[in-house]
Image (cartoon, helix red, strand yellow):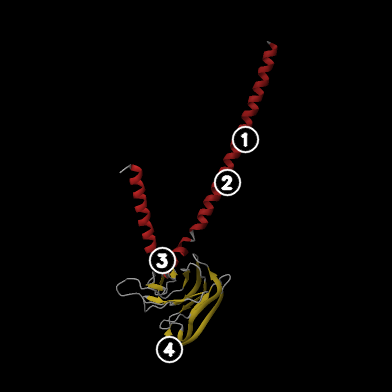
Amino acid sequence: MSFPAAFRRLAAVTAGAAALTIGLAVPALAHVSINPGTAEQGGFTKVAFRVPNERDKDSTSKVEVSFPLDHPLPFVSVKPVPGWKVKVTEGKLPKPVTTEYGEITEAVTKVTWSGGKIEPGQFQEFEVSMGALPEDTDRLLFPTTQTYDGGEVVKWADEPKADGSEPEHPAPVLRLTPAAGGDGHGTGTASPSAAPAATDASPAAPSVTAVAASGADSSDGTARALGVAGLILGLVGAVAGVLGLRRGRNA
């Protein structure tokens, strides 16, 4: 087999393998997701529901995100998206939930974006700020319904499988991790024991300022002394030059 023929065959095989790999990867990436996918228990977070368009012709015209009722979120706010209308729906919970903010009987049950378009081959992110996140679970599910302008409706509502494999239409999942500070609120506030360190360090500031001031005065005095000495040497040199010229003429 000639070298050009072998090279063409190798290129064809490589291209085919790459196409197959991309074809297998696309379905795994083209579902509605939540970003970032993790947040701290007990805290507040801002997430973006990322909605891609999987169709070749139709555009996505409506996105509806359902919020958990078993772990309701007391505070939910949305960021406006140009070209889209947003509707936040509140409703009564199946049963009251007790939190550190009191007993919750109503909460946000659904957020709907409509009136815009996600064209084929594009995606859109819808941002939401929410909290306080529950501390008695390690995940929150947000079943999402995606509607296309051709009338097709896709429900992303499948729960994660026990074996770790991905379901056909997975619901966006927010994983919850223990707060880094260990106080369950994820605020990142410094502990009270750290405060005295800043107080103890403050008296040192005047001494630094004083040293800097005295150093500046010393430098200024030295500069003046050098200037006077240079002026005297210049005068001596001028006098010596005049005397030299006179002696030369007399000679």
Residue on which disc 4 sits: 94
Give the residue type at disc 2: Asp
As drawn, 15 above or below 23: above
Residue on which disc 1 sits: 228
Callouts 2 and 4 close, C-beta under 8 Å: no
Q: Is residue 9 left or right of residue 79?
A: left
**Mark 3 nearby-residue class (10 Å; few <14, some 14–19, many ≥20):** few
Looking at the rendered image, the disc whose residue lies closer to the viewer, 3 or 1, is: 3
Q: Earlier in the sequence, mark 2 or mark 4?
A: 4
Q: Earlier in the sequence, mark 3 or mark 2?
A: 3
Callouts 1 and 4 close, C-beta under 8 Å: no
Q: Earlier in the sequence, mark 3 or mark 1?
A: 3
Assign a secondary structure to mark 1. helix
Q: Position of residue 144 (x, y in %)?
A: 45, 76
Residue on which disc 2 sits: 217
Q: Residue furthest top?
A: 251
Between the C-alphas of marks 3 and 1, the distance is 79 Å
Q: Residue furthest front?
A: 1
Looking at the rendered image, the disc whose residue lies closer to the viewer, 3 or 2, is: 3
Between the C-alphas of marks 2 and 4, the distance is 77 Å
Between the C-alphas of marks 1 and 2, the distance is 17 Å
Between the C-alphas of marks 3 and 2, the distance is 69 Å
